[in-house]
Amino acid sequence: MLPHLNFVSLTGFATKDATIRRKASGQIKAEFSFEVNRPFLRATGEPVSDLFLIDVWGDLGRWTAENVKQGSKLVIFGTLNKESYVTRGGGREHLTVVKAKYLRPIDEDLLEGKVDIDEMKKDDWGRATLAAQVNIVDAAIDGSPFDLPRSGDEE
């Protein structure tokens, strides 16, 4: 049986400094909130964005806690995970968290001239738009000048 693919790529900025937590198991986790602008504006002219909670574990989590500050522009690759917790009132809440597996600071050059905003607004993407997104992912990985801790590198 083949595993299913759970992969998300995001570009945006941290809305607060990353904080580190040590779990009861001894594992290290950094977390921060991350804002991603959508490619359109509201009728009022206001930008539309999505806010995500980002979890980063282990050595990459330590690096994140030391380096990701409010306003940091990042590219993040990871997985979407549904989590639930019990509220103070005893109810159950659900949220979707991005578990970052790779992240790095970016500059505007990564996306400049490579994203067709009109195509991004469409409800469905053609092959060319999807290929452009894959090329951005490839450029983000190949262009990394940063020595980030990553496991599984096979170079």
Image: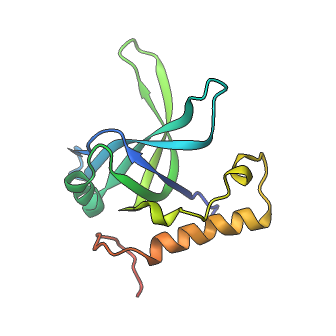
Q: Is residue 41 left or right of residue 10?
A: right
Q: Point out the image quarter for the N terminus.
A: bottom right
Q: Is residue 145 left or right of residue 24?
A: right
Q: Is residue 47 left or right of residue 68?
A: right
**Residue 6, x across and y down, in percent:** 59, 57
Task: Work out which residue is located at the far bottom of the displayed protein and give it.
Answer: 155
Q: Give 94 or 32, whichever is nearer the viewer.
A: 32
The residue lying at 28 percent from left, 49 percent from top is 29
Residue 2 in view (yes/no): no
The residue lying at 73 percent from left, 54 percent from top is 119
Task: Work out which residue is located at the far top of the displayed protein and give it.
Answer: 89
Decide: is 148 above or below 153. above
The residue lying at 46 percent from left, 78 percent from top is 142
Picture quadrant of residue 144: bottom left
**Residue 54, x across and y down, in percent:** 40, 46
Q: Give 140 or 153, whichever is nearer the viewer.
A: 140
Residue 81 in view (yes/no): yes
Display coloring: rainbow
Decide: is 50 above or below 154. above
The residue lying at 77 percent from left, 56 percent from top is 125
